[in-house]
């Protein structure tokens, strides 16, 4: 019975995606969503944000799955404050994101 409860709980947990897009102007756009595929399509269609309407995304450079909206918003905010060099570091090594969160000298 415990296993069935765990499966049901996992099915009802809402996940959020924090993502970095690489845009056609070679800049990065950071956001979060509950449905990464749908949100990326909206960026491509020019309906997700003013920025990606002007500078179309080329690809999803990196993404992270988190379990609550508060953490997604916090990660998005922290990533936006990173230098381009540090954004490229977390794109290349996604696990570094958590080190950047704890160490504020990277901003």
Image (cartoon, grey):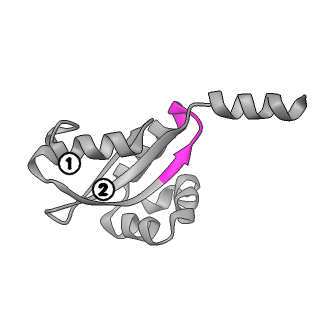
**Residue 68 image-quadrant placement:** top right
**Residue 32 image-quadrant placement:** top left
Work out which quarter of the rendered image holds the N terminus and state it: top right
Q: Based on the picture, tell me whether residue 18 belongs to the magenta stretch.
A: no
Q: Give the residue displayed 57% in from the left and 56% down from the top.
A: 98
Residue 75 coordinates in the image, percent (x, y): 47, 45
Q: Is residue 106 left or right of residue 13?
A: left
Answer above or below: position of 16 versus 9.
below
Along the polypeptide, which appears first: circle 2 or circle 1? 2
Work out which quarter of the rendered image holds the C terminus and state it: bottom left
Instruction: Identify the residue at the far left of this view.
Output: 54
Residue 31 coordinates in the image, percent (x, y): 35, 44
* Badge 2 element: strand
Q: Local crowd at mark 2 within 10 Å, few (<14), some, or many (≥20)?
A: many
Residue 57 coordinates in the image, percent (x, y): 21, 56
Q: Is residue 16 left or right of residue 55?
A: right
Q: Give the residue displayed 57% in from the left and 31% down from the top.
A: 14
Q: Local crowd at mark 1 within 10 Å, few (<14), some, or many (≥20)?
A: some
Answer above or below: position of 27 versus 64.
below
Which segment is the magenta one? 64-71
């Amino acid at each position: 019975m415990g296993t069935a409860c765990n499966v049901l709980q996992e099915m009802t947990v809402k996940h959020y995606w924090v993502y970095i897009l690489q845009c056609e102007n070679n800049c990065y756009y950071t956001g979060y969503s509950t449905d990464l595929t749908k949100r990326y399509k909206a960026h491509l269609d020019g309906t997700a944000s003013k920025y990606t309407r002007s500078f179309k995304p080329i690809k999803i450079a990196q993404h992270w799955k988190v379990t609550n909206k508060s953490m997604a918003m916090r990660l998005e905010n922290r990533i936006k404050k990173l230098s381009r060099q540090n954004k490229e570091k977390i794109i290349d090594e996604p696990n570094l994101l958590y080190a950047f969160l704890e160490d504020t000298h990277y901003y």
